[in-house]
Amino acid sequence: MEGGILAKYDFLTLDDVETSGKRVFLRVDINVPLDPSTHEILDDTRIRAVCPTLEELKGARVVLGSHQSRPGKDDFTSLEPHTKLLERYCSQQVRIVDDVLGPQARQEISKVRPGEVLVLDNLRFCAEENIDDKPEKLAKTHLVKRLSPLFEVYVNDAFATAHRSQPSIVGLSEVLPSAAGRLMEKEVGAVSTLLLEPKRPCVYVLGGSKVEDKVPVMEHILSRDKADRILLGGVPAKLFLRALDRKVTFDEREVSGYESFLETARNLVGKYRDRIVVPVDLAFEEKGKRTDRRVDSTLPQEPTLDIGKETVEKYSKVVRGAATVVANGPLGVFETNGFDLGTKSILESMALINGYTVIGGGHLVGLATIHGIEDKFSHVSTAGGAMLSLLAGQTLPGVDALVRAAKRTRGSREESS
Ligand code: 3PG
Ligand code: MG
């Protein structure tokens, strides 16, 4: 199918597999922002998002697995605080075992009764889970060999980790009958809507600090004529201002490493100049205060902290006239007082329109939650990188594995009928 985008019938869902009374391994992504010292959960969006699938699996013997951060990071920790919130939000009995695949975990797994949920601790405590590899290699890892015999069904609801080719995302799906959970289904469905037949005008708002994951999205959606306007903020705006040869000077620390994208950016503005929109003004901190300056004036050698007020007006107007709006990445340093204007205004304009609206990436979703408008969007994605990869036309290893598993199941059902 075009650009690796999947219609939802390409993989099995909870409608297609019998889970009642069955031993189900449920892979979720409840990797959340944590206070590095207290490990208090700062945003629980991903934990709440698991509830619909858990609700549907109420008759099953559920063992849930997730990672939290990566080895070496301050927030690489146990899933104990997550387990408490899961129990609270999903009104089910949820307990955790202090193990991933050792004897203690396997013994606890064998004791799970229908209606109970057992959480394995952070899957990345197991070194193998941190390696990206080919599906056939992943199917032979210790994690898969030890855990798969204990389950009858594998359910993947970890859309936000589907861009990783890791044992619990791909390996288990290679060897067990597998289905997508409700969140996975919803997330893939949202991207399909955007890439197949988006209602026009379709507007993208791309900000944040990473240009490496925004430029491929721009190339894909522009070359397939799936976007009418792309409004830029954050570091992507700087890359394209430079590609347009505007005489803007930047704090080099902000834009280091982006030079390798300059040629692609130049090609894109060469072909799609009327669709790529860059700020007309930018905001800086001068003498402790927000100052907005037009990009054609002499700019201070200070970090850019937001799009300027004139740009906010311009962008908001485009958003208000759109039928589809997708936003990923903040337009400025919204954590700093006064510099959340651009990001907040765009989110508010999106929340007001009648069209199809999608926000993704932890920062935007967190800000929408702080302002209490998170339920005003058609779809709030729990993913950052995975959604951008799909929008860039790439396939996701976790979704591919579900598709292969569906083919196996359909093949064996046909044989036995
Ligand atoms: C994420 O938040 O990006 C996902 O949970 C995947 O985690 P990772 O980027 O550490 O693989
Ligand atoms: Mg990540």
Image: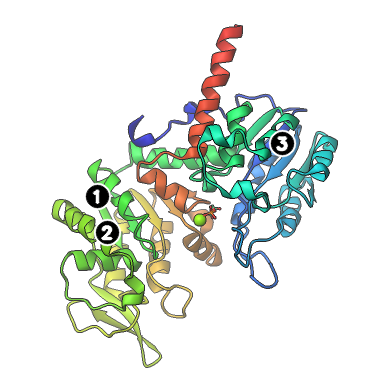
Q: Residue drawn 62% across and 41% down?
A: 168
Q: Residue drawn 35% across and 73% down?
A: 254
Residue marked by disc 2: 261
In the image, residue 59 above or below residue 230? above
Residue 228 is tagged as 1
Q: Please state the horizontal and vertical placement of residue 409, each as a whole percent of the image.
A: 58, 20
Q: Residue drawn 39% across and 39% down?
A: 193
Instruction: Report if residue 39 is visible in the image.
Output: yes
Some atom of ligand 1 lies within 8 Å of the CB belonging to the residue at label 1:
no
Q: In this view, does 226 lie to the left or right of 44?
A: left
As shown in the figure, which amino acid type bears the numbered disc 3? Leu
Q: Earlier in the sequence, mark 3 or mark 2?
A: 3
User: Viewer-proximal residue, 71 or 65?
Assistant: 71
SS of the residue under disc 2: helix
SS of the residue under disc 1: loop
SS of the residue under disc 3: helix
In the image, residue 7 above or below residue 43? above
Q: Residue drawn 62% across and 66% down?
A: 42
Q: How far apart are labels 2 and 1 at the CA level?
A: 22 Å
Instruction: Report if residue 314 is visible in the image.
Output: no
In the image, residue 224 above or below residue 412? below
Q: How crowded is mark 3: few (under 14 residues within 10 Å), some or many (20 or more)?
A: some
Some atom of ligand 1 lies within 8 Å of the CB belonging to the residue at label 3:
no
Q: Residues within 10 Å of mark 2 (few under 14, many from 20)?
A: some
As shown in the figure, which amino acid type bears the numbered disc 2? Phe
Residue marked by disc 3: 147
Q: Please state the horizontal and vertical placement of residue 206, each as a whole percent of the image.
A: 35, 59
**In front: mark 2 or mark 1?**
2
Instruction: Name the colouring of the figure.
Output: rainbow
Q: Earlier in the sequence, mark 2 or mark 1?
A: 1
Quadrant containing the C terminus in the rendered view:
top right
From this viewpoint, which residue is outermost toward the top?
Answer: 417
